Image (tube, rainbow, N blue to C red):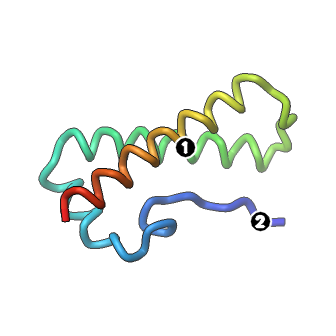
Amino acid sequence: MPIENHALDIDFPEYAEKIQSLKATDTSFKSQSDEYHQLDKKIRTLEENNVPTDDEHFNEMKMQRAALKDILYARLKADG
């Protein structure tokens, strides 16, 4: 089973242009977006290596990714 990529432009294709624009013009959005993508990459790597799903650190990373995604999505909706 392939590991799902949660890149912002994949999960929110309707905001792809806005994502790129905000990354270029808003340092806070870019920083949070970069953190989100780094975290997503770490999670996908762990999933590819079959990390136990009850691993506390792994679950914390997933919760952090979800929180960042919520923040970024709210910004996308608010800035338009």
Residue shown at 81% from the left, 43% from the top = 49
Can you tell which of label 2 and label 1 is closer to the viewer? 1
Label 2 SS: loop
Label 1 SS: helix
Q: Position of residue 47 (x, y in %)?
A: 76, 46
| Left or right placement of residue 13 versus residue 32 in this view | right
Residue shown at 26% from the left, 72% from the top = 17
Q: Position of residue 7 (x, y in %)?
A: 49, 59
Tag 2 residue: 2
- Using the image, tell me which numbered label, if any, was put on residue 48: none
Pick the front one: 37 or 66: 66
Which image quadrant is residue 61 in?
top right
Residue 52 vertical placement versus 57 (above, below):
below
How many residues crowd mark 1 within 10 Å: few (<14), some (14–19), many (20+)?
some
| Left or right placement of residue 34 versus residue 78 in this view | right
Residue 45 vertical placement versus 52 (above, below):
below
Residue shown at 37% from the left, 76% from the top = 14
Which image quadrant is residue 59 in?
top right
Residue 55 vertical placement versus 10 (above, below):
above
Pick the front one: 28 or 37: 28
How many residues crowd mark 2 within 10 Å: few (<14), some (14–19), many (20+)?
few
- Using the image, tell me which numbered label, if any, was put on residue 66: 1
| Left or right placement of residue 66 versus residue 30 in this view | right
Query: Nearer the N terminus, badge 2 or badge 1?
Result: 2
Mark 1 residue type: Ala
Residue shown at 17% from the left, 56% from the top = 24
C-alpha gap between disc 2 and disc 1: 20 Å
Pick the front one: 49 or 12: 12
Mark 2 residue type: Pro
Q: Quadrant of the N terminus?
A: bottom right
Pointer 2 with pointer 1, Cβ within 8 A:
no
